[in-house]
Amino acid sequence: MKKRPIIGLLCITLVNQPEYAELGLDLEEKIQDLGIDVIAFTPYGIQWERNIVSGKLLDNGQWIRGELPLPQAIYNRLYGTHPNTISKLATYTGDHRIFNWTNRLDKYLVYQSLSEIHQQILPLTLEYTRENLISSLNDFDQVVLKPKQGHYGLNIYRIHKDKTNRYHVYKRKIKQPFLKLSQNQLLDFIEQIQTSERQYLIQQFIEPTQWNGRYFDIRVLVQKDHIGMWQVTAMISRVARKNHFATNDTYKLELPEILLAERNGNAILTRLQMISIHVAQILEQKLAHFGELSIDFIIDRQENLWLIEVNGKPRKDLFAIIDNNEVIEKVYLRPLEYAKYLAERE
Protein backbone atom coordinates (compact mmCIF):
# COMPACT_ATOMS: atom_id res chain seq x y z
CA MET A 1 0.00 0.00 0.00
CA LYS A 2 1.36 3.40 -1.04
CA LYS A 3 2.45 5.60 1.87
CA ARG A 4 0.67 8.91 2.32
CA PRO A 5 3.02 11.85 1.75
CA ILE A 6 3.77 13.93 4.83
CA ILE A 7 3.08 17.65 4.43
CA GLY A 8 4.51 20.15 6.91
CA LEU A 9 3.11 23.54 7.88
CA LEU A 10 6.09 25.47 9.25
CA CYS A 11 4.69 27.99 11.78
CA ILE A 12 6.06 30.48 14.29
CA THR A 13 3.78 29.14 17.05
CA LEU A 14 1.26 26.36 17.57
CA VAL A 15 -1.12 28.63 19.48
CA ASN A 16 -4.25 28.92 17.33
CA GLN A 17 -2.54 26.67 14.82
CA PRO A 18 -3.05 25.19 12.43
CA GLU A 19 -5.33 27.85 11.00
CA TYR A 20 -7.31 25.07 9.34
CA ALA A 21 -8.68 24.06 12.74
CA GLU A 22 -10.36 27.39 13.49
CA LEU A 23 -12.67 27.81 10.53
CA GLY A 24 -15.81 25.90 11.34
CA LEU A 25 -15.75 24.52 7.79
CA ASP A 26 -14.99 20.91 8.77
CA LEU A 27 -11.92 20.89 6.55
CA GLU A 28 -10.34 18.01 8.44
CA GLU A 29 -12.28 15.41 6.45
CA LYS A 30 -11.43 17.10 3.16
CA ILE A 31 -7.75 17.26 4.13
CA GLN A 32 -7.73 13.55 4.92
CA ASP A 33 -9.47 12.88 1.59
CA LEU A 34 -6.41 14.40 -0.11
CA GLY A 35 -4.47 11.32 0.95
CA ILE A 36 -1.85 13.19 2.96
CA ASP A 37 -0.60 13.35 6.53
CA VAL A 38 -0.35 16.95 7.77
CA ILE A 39 1.64 18.27 10.71
CA ALA A 40 1.97 21.87 11.89
CA PHE A 41 5.33 22.44 13.56
CA THR A 42 7.69 25.22 14.62
CA PRO A 43 11.46 25.42 14.13
CA TYR A 44 11.77 24.30 17.77
CA GLY A 45 9.82 21.12 17.05
CA ILE A 46 12.45 19.72 14.69
CA GLN A 47 14.55 16.89 16.12
CA TRP A 48 17.35 16.73 13.58
CA GLU A 49 19.16 13.82 15.18
CA ARG A 50 16.02 11.65 14.87
CA ASN A 51 14.76 13.11 11.55
CA ILE A 52 11.35 13.82 13.06
CA VAL A 53 9.18 16.82 13.84
CA SER A 54 6.79 17.23 16.75
CA GLY A 55 3.74 19.45 16.57
CA LYS A 56 0.01 19.23 15.88
CA LEU A 57 -1.01 16.55 13.43
CA LEU A 58 -4.34 15.58 11.96
CA ASP A 59 -5.49 12.18 13.20
CA ASN A 60 -9.00 10.81 12.60
CA GLY A 61 -10.42 14.29 12.12
CA GLN A 62 -8.79 15.78 15.22
CA TRP A 63 -5.68 17.95 15.65
CA ILE A 64 -3.55 16.31 18.32
CA ARG A 65 0.02 16.60 19.60
CA GLY A 66 2.30 14.09 17.97
CA GLU A 67 5.39 13.28 15.93
CA LEU A 68 6.03 12.41 12.30
CA PRO A 69 9.12 11.94 10.14
CA LEU A 70 10.48 15.08 8.49
CA PRO A 71 7.92 16.18 5.88
CA GLN A 72 8.41 15.52 2.19
CA ALA A 73 7.02 18.95 1.26
CA ILE A 74 6.73 22.08 3.39
CA TYR A 75 4.42 25.08 3.24
CA ASN A 76 6.31 27.90 4.96
CA ARG A 77 4.07 29.97 7.25
CA LEU A 78 6.89 31.83 8.98
CA TYR A 79 7.33 35.45 7.95
CA GLY A 80 10.91 36.17 7.05
CA THR A 81 12.33 34.43 10.13
CA HIS A 82 14.55 31.38 10.74
CA PRO A 83 16.23 31.33 7.30
CA ASN A 84 18.91 28.92 8.53
CA THR A 85 16.26 26.42 9.61
CA ILE A 86 14.56 26.63 6.23
CA SER A 87 17.88 26.16 4.44
CA LYS A 88 18.62 23.08 6.53
CA LEU A 89 15.16 21.66 5.80
CA ALA A 90 15.78 22.27 2.10
CA THR A 91 18.87 20.05 2.22
CA TYR A 92 16.56 17.26 3.35
CA THR A 93 13.52 17.84 1.15
CA GLY A 94 15.15 19.65 -1.78
CA ASP A 95 14.67 23.35 -2.57
CA HIS A 96 11.78 22.62 -4.89
CA ARG A 97 9.72 21.05 -2.09
CA ILE A 98 9.57 24.10 0.19
CA PHE A 99 7.40 26.91 -1.10
CA ASN A 100 7.03 30.51 0.00
CA TRP A 101 10.50 30.06 1.45
CA THR A 102 10.97 33.76 0.75
CA ASN A 103 7.77 35.53 1.78
CA ARG A 104 8.86 38.79 3.39
CA LEU A 105 9.22 40.48 0.04
CA ASP A 106 11.45 43.45 -0.70
CA LYS A 107 9.07 45.88 -2.40
CA TYR A 108 11.82 47.39 -4.51
CA LEU A 109 12.93 43.99 -5.82
CA VAL A 110 9.30 43.27 -6.69
CA TYR A 111 9.07 46.60 -8.54
CA GLN A 112 12.29 45.92 -10.46
CA SER A 113 11.18 42.39 -11.32
CA LEU A 114 7.88 43.59 -12.78
CA SER A 115 8.83 46.94 -14.28
CA GLU A 116 10.13 45.66 -17.63
CA ILE A 117 6.79 44.08 -18.52
CA HIS A 118 4.17 45.82 -16.38
CA GLN A 119 5.56 49.36 -16.16
CA GLN A 120 2.22 50.87 -17.22
CA ILE A 121 0.45 49.63 -14.07
CA LEU A 122 3.25 50.32 -11.56
CA PRO A 123 3.49 53.64 -9.72
CA LEU A 124 7.02 54.99 -10.09
CA THR A 125 9.05 53.57 -7.20
CA LEU A 126 12.51 54.66 -6.07
CA GLU A 127 14.80 53.80 -3.21
CA TYR A 128 14.89 56.60 -0.69
CA THR A 129 17.56 59.22 -1.05
CA ARG A 130 17.24 62.92 -0.36
CA GLU A 131 17.65 63.65 -4.06
CA ASN A 132 15.04 61.07 -5.11
CA LEU A 133 12.52 62.44 -2.62
CA ILE A 134 12.89 66.08 -3.68
CA SER A 135 12.77 65.27 -7.40
CA SER A 136 9.72 63.00 -6.92
CA LEU A 137 7.84 65.70 -5.03
CA ASN A 138 8.69 68.19 -7.75
CA ASP A 139 7.30 65.78 -10.34
CA PHE A 140 4.20 64.50 -8.53
CA ASP A 141 3.36 66.85 -5.61
CA GLN A 142 2.43 63.76 -3.57
CA VAL A 143 4.35 60.59 -2.79
CA VAL A 144 4.06 57.68 -0.38
CA LEU A 145 6.99 56.78 1.84
CA LYS A 146 6.89 53.11 2.87
CA PRO A 147 9.33 50.54 4.28
CA LYS A 148 10.94 48.24 1.74
CA GLN A 149 9.87 45.23 3.79
CA GLY A 150 6.93 46.56 5.76
CA HIS A 151 3.64 44.86 6.49
CA TYR A 152 0.18 45.62 7.91
CA GLY A 153 0.42 49.18 6.59
CA LEU A 154 2.73 50.23 9.43
CA ASN A 155 5.15 53.17 9.16
CA ILE A 156 3.65 54.48 5.92
CA TYR A 157 3.54 58.22 5.25
CA ARG A 158 1.99 60.33 2.51
CA ILE A 159 3.87 63.54 1.74
CA HIS A 160 2.34 66.50 -0.11
CA LYS A 161 4.21 69.57 -1.30
CA ASP A 162 2.04 72.71 -1.30
CA LYS A 163 2.37 75.87 -3.40
CA THR A 164 4.43 77.60 -0.72
CA ASN A 165 6.99 74.76 -0.71
CA ARG A 166 5.87 73.48 2.68
CA TYR A 167 5.66 69.72 3.09
CA HIS A 168 2.57 68.15 4.67
CA VAL A 169 3.16 64.72 6.20
CA TYR A 170 0.14 62.44 6.68
CA LYS A 171 0.28 59.23 8.65
CA ARG A 172 -3.25 57.89 8.24
CA LYS A 173 -5.69 60.65 7.44
CA ILE A 174 -6.37 62.21 4.04
CA LYS A 175 -6.91 65.80 5.15
CA GLN A 176 -5.19 66.19 8.51
CA PRO A 177 -1.38 66.27 8.33
CA PHE A 178 0.37 65.55 11.60
CA LEU A 179 3.42 67.55 10.47
CA LYS A 180 4.01 70.64 8.32
CA LEU A 181 7.69 71.03 7.57
CA SER A 182 10.27 72.89 5.56
CA GLN A 183 12.38 70.87 3.15
CA ASN A 184 15.26 70.56 5.61
CA GLN A 185 12.91 69.62 8.43
CA LEU A 186 11.32 66.95 6.23
CA LEU A 187 14.68 65.43 5.37
CA ASP A 188 15.70 65.45 9.03
CA PHE A 189 12.41 63.76 9.98
CA ILE A 190 13.01 60.94 7.49
CA GLU A 191 16.56 60.47 8.73
CA GLN A 192 15.08 59.93 12.20
CA ILE A 193 12.54 57.28 11.16
CA GLN A 194 14.85 55.38 8.81
CA THR A 195 17.04 52.73 10.42
CA SER A 196 19.32 49.99 9.13
CA GLU A 197 16.44 47.53 9.64
CA ARG A 198 13.82 49.83 8.12
CA GLN A 199 14.87 51.25 4.78
CA TYR A 200 12.32 53.33 2.90
CA LEU A 201 10.96 53.54 -0.63
CA ILE A 202 9.38 56.48 -2.41
CA GLN A 203 6.26 55.57 -4.38
CA GLN A 204 4.26 57.84 -6.65
CA PHE A 205 0.90 58.51 -4.96
CA ILE A 206 -2.04 57.42 -7.09
CA GLU A 207 -5.39 58.69 -5.85
CA PRO A 208 -7.87 55.81 -5.96
CA THR A 209 -11.44 56.11 -7.03
CA GLN A 210 -13.92 56.04 -4.14
CA TRP A 211 -16.92 54.04 -3.07
CA ASN A 212 -19.36 55.89 -0.84
CA GLY A 213 -16.67 58.49 -0.21
CA ARG A 214 -14.02 55.95 0.84
CA TYR A 215 -10.92 54.61 -0.85
CA PHE A 216 -10.78 50.88 -1.58
CA ASP A 217 -8.41 48.34 -3.06
CA ILE A 218 -8.81 44.91 -4.64
CA ARG A 219 -6.77 42.00 -3.32
CA VAL A 220 -6.33 39.04 -5.65
CA LEU A 221 -5.28 35.69 -4.17
CA VAL A 222 -3.33 33.55 -6.63
CA GLN A 223 -2.39 29.99 -5.69
CA LYS A 224 -0.96 26.94 -7.39
CA ASP A 225 -3.31 24.01 -7.81
CA HIS A 226 -2.90 20.24 -7.61
CA ILE A 227 -0.83 20.14 -10.82
CA GLY A 228 1.29 23.19 -10.05
CA MET A 229 -0.59 25.69 -12.23
CA TRP A 230 -1.31 29.25 -11.06
CA GLN A 231 -4.99 29.98 -10.50
CA VAL A 232 -6.94 32.95 -9.15
CA THR A 233 -8.70 31.53 -6.11
CA ALA A 234 -10.52 34.59 -4.74
CA MET A 235 -10.75 38.38 -4.75
CA ILE A 236 -11.73 40.75 -1.96
CA SER A 237 -11.82 44.51 -1.42
CA ARG A 238 -10.78 46.42 1.66
CA VAL A 239 -12.69 49.67 2.11
CA ALA A 240 -10.75 52.29 4.07
CA ARG A 241 -12.11 54.17 7.05
CA LYS A 242 -13.58 57.60 6.35
CA ASN A 243 -10.87 60.16 5.53
CA HIS A 244 -8.12 57.52 5.65
CA PHE A 245 -5.89 56.86 2.65
CA ALA A 246 -4.59 53.41 3.67
CA THR A 247 -6.92 50.44 3.23
CA ASN A 248 -5.09 48.70 6.08
CA ASP A 249 -7.27 51.02 8.19
CA THR A 250 -10.19 48.89 7.12
CA TYR A 251 -13.77 50.04 7.54
CA LYS A 252 -15.22 46.91 5.96
CA LEU A 253 -14.46 44.06 3.61
CA GLU A 254 -16.58 43.83 0.49
CA LEU A 255 -16.82 41.88 -2.75
CA PRO A 256 -15.17 43.76 -5.63
CA GLU A 257 -18.11 43.15 -7.95
CA ILE A 258 -20.33 45.13 -5.57
CA LEU A 259 -17.94 48.09 -5.48
CA LEU A 260 -17.59 48.03 -9.26
CA ALA A 261 -21.30 47.60 -10.01
CA GLU A 262 -21.55 51.07 -11.54
CA ARG A 263 -18.35 50.68 -13.54
CA ASN A 264 -17.14 48.23 -16.16
CA GLY A 265 -16.74 45.67 -13.40
CA ASN A 266 -16.56 42.39 -15.33
CA ALA A 267 -13.90 43.68 -17.71
CA ILE A 268 -11.85 45.14 -14.85
CA LEU A 269 -11.95 41.92 -12.81
CA THR A 270 -11.12 39.76 -15.82
CA ARG A 271 -8.07 41.92 -16.54
CA LEU A 272 -7.04 41.78 -12.86
CA GLN A 273 -7.08 37.99 -12.95
CA MET A 274 -4.95 37.81 -16.09
CA ILE A 275 -2.42 40.32 -14.74
CA SER A 276 -2.24 38.59 -11.35
CA ILE A 277 -1.36 35.20 -12.82
CA HIS A 278 1.31 36.79 -15.01
CA VAL A 279 2.73 38.70 -12.03
CA ALA A 280 2.99 35.47 -10.02
CA GLN A 281 4.77 33.74 -12.89
CA ILE A 282 7.29 36.57 -13.25
CA LEU A 283 8.03 36.82 -9.52
CA GLU A 284 8.54 33.10 -9.21
CA GLN A 285 10.92 33.17 -12.15
CA LYS A 286 12.92 36.11 -10.78
CA LEU A 287 12.68 35.88 -6.98
CA ALA A 288 11.75 32.56 -5.36
CA HIS A 289 9.58 29.46 -5.30
CA PHE A 290 6.01 30.43 -4.45
CA GLY A 291 2.78 28.50 -4.04
CA GLU A 292 0.62 31.51 -3.29
CA LEU A 293 0.72 35.31 -3.39
CA SER A 294 -1.79 38.08 -2.89
CA ILE A 295 -1.64 41.15 -5.10
CA ASP A 296 -3.15 44.52 -4.20
CA PHE A 297 -4.55 46.81 -6.88
CA ILE A 298 -6.30 50.15 -6.90
CA ILE A 299 -8.34 51.80 -9.62
CA ASP A 300 -7.90 55.51 -10.28
CA ARG A 301 -10.64 57.94 -11.30
CA GLN A 302 -10.02 57.19 -14.98
CA GLU A 303 -10.48 53.44 -14.29
CA ASN A 304 -6.79 52.70 -14.80
CA LEU A 305 -5.44 49.74 -12.83
CA TRP A 306 -2.42 50.18 -10.57
CA LEU A 307 -0.51 47.43 -8.81
CA ILE A 308 0.38 48.74 -5.35
CA GLU A 309 1.84 45.77 -3.50
CA VAL A 310 2.52 42.03 -3.54
CA ASN A 311 2.27 39.96 -0.35
CA GLY A 312 4.29 36.79 0.11
CA LYS A 313 2.30 35.56 3.12
CA PRO A 314 -1.35 36.23 2.28
CA ARG A 315 -3.92 36.62 5.03
CA LYS A 316 -6.57 34.02 4.34
CA ASP A 317 -9.05 35.24 6.95
CA LEU A 318 -9.85 38.30 4.81
CA PHE A 319 -11.67 36.05 2.37
CA ALA A 320 -14.05 34.65 4.97
CA ILE A 321 -16.81 37.10 3.97
CA ILE A 322 -17.20 35.32 0.63
CA ASP A 323 -20.55 33.55 0.82
CA ASN A 324 -19.32 30.45 -0.96
CA ASN A 325 -17.88 27.60 1.07
CA GLU A 326 -16.36 26.01 -2.02
CA VAL A 327 -14.24 29.12 -2.64
CA ILE A 328 -13.22 29.39 1.03
CA GLU A 329 -12.22 25.73 1.04
CA LYS A 330 -10.02 26.32 -2.00
CA VAL A 331 -8.32 29.25 -0.25
CA TYR A 332 -7.15 26.86 2.49
CA LEU A 333 -6.83 23.56 0.62
CA ARG A 334 -4.97 24.59 -2.51
CA PRO A 335 -1.61 25.01 -0.75
CA LEU A 336 -1.98 21.48 0.62
CA GLU A 337 -2.90 20.14 -2.82
CA TYR A 338 0.18 21.83 -4.25
CA ALA A 339 2.35 20.47 -1.44
CA LYS A 340 1.10 16.97 -2.22
CA TYR A 341 1.97 17.51 -5.87
CA LEU A 342 5.51 18.53 -4.86
CA ALA A 343 5.91 15.59 -2.47
CA GLU A 344 4.94 13.06 -5.14
CA ARG A 345 7.09 14.51 -7.93
CA GLU A 346 10.23 12.63 -8.84
Image: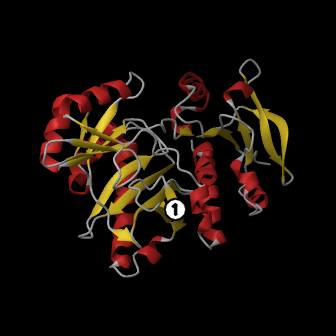
Q: Is residue 163 visible?
A: yes
Q: Name the residue located 51 percent from the left edge and 58 percent from the top edge.
A: 250
Q: Nearer the viewer, residue 80 or 133?
A: 133
Q: Amino acid type of disc 1?
A: Tyr
Q: Position of residue 109 (x, y in %)?
A: 32, 37
Q: Which residue is mark 1?
A: 251
Residue 230 visible in rendering? no
Local crowd size for mark 1, using a 10 Å CA cut-off: few (<14), some (14–19), many (≥20): some
- Location of residue 74 in the rendering, given as x and y in whole percent from the top left corner: 62, 39
Q: Nearer the viewer, residue 278 or 217?
A: 217
Q: Nearer the viewer, residue 178 or 227?
A: 178
Q: Which image quadrant for residue 208?
A: bottom left
Is residue 37 depicted above or below 298 in this figure?
Answer: above
Q: Total number of numbered labels?
A: 1
> Relative to 139, is 269 on the left or the right?
right
Quadrant position of the C terminus in the picture: top right
The single residue placed furthest to the bottom in the displayed view is: 262
In percent of width and height, residue 72 lies at 65, 37
Percent x, y of residue 136:
17, 42
